[in-house]
Image: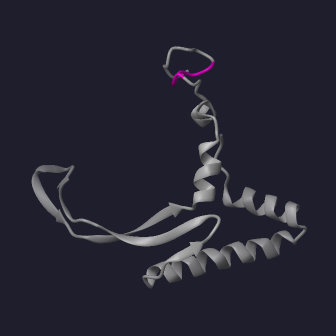
Amino acid sequence: MSTITKKELIAELSDTTGIKHADVTLMLESFMELAVMHLAAGDEITMRTFGTFDLRVAKGKIGRNPKQPNSEVMIPDRCVVRFKPSKELKSRVASVPVHHLHGLNGNGTHPLNGNGTHI
């Protein structure tokens, strides 16, 4: 498993669809900007076979300043983005073998050292 960057995603979309790299970049940038704009306006974004982005309220809590651990700071309620995957996405992800994540064997150990410690 690896991290796919925006640049790599654009290149793969361009190769797969035959659409120019610059056009794919414009489309992806436009999509992201529209998604941010609608979420910031409180809208929900639903893509049936992918999932739903919406806003939830993260409850306020008492926090501490690491530089002054004895002083408490009230962190107010705030909106956070939540992603709820579709049934199709959940199903496809559930079929990924667990050992593919983070290079682990099924027992939670690394395949090269076998004892669960980092290499």
Instruction: Look at 74% across and 77% down and name the residue there.
Output: 26
Query: Where is residue 8, by image quadrant?
Result: bottom right
Image coordinates of residue 93 in percent, x first then y, are 61, 47
The picture places residue 112, in percent across and down from the top left corner, at 63, 17
Residue at the bottom extreme?
41
Q: How is the image coloured?
A: one colour
- The image position of residue 68, as x and y in percent, is 14, 51
Give 12 or 86, whichever is nearer the viewer: 86
Q: Position of residue 79 (x, y in %)?
A: 34, 72
Quadrant where the N terminus sits is top right
Residue placed most toward the observer, 16 or 62: 16
Residue depicted at 49% across the width and 63% down the height: 83
Q: Main secondary structure of the magenta part?
A: loop
Horizontally, residue 90 falls left or right of residue 82, namely: right
Answer whether residue 115 is magenta in the image.
no
Magenta segment boundaries in residue numbering: 107-111
Q: Residue at x 57, y 22 (%)?
A: 110
Which residue is most to the left? 70
- Which quadrant of the figure has residue 55? bottom left
Task: Decide if residue 101 is on the left or right side of residue 10.
Answer: left
Count the numbered circles shown.
0
Q: Quadrant of the C terminus?
A: top right
Task: Judge whether 96 appears above or below 111 on screen.
Answer: below
Nearer-the-camera pick, 88 or 98:
88
The verdict on residue 109 being magenta is yes
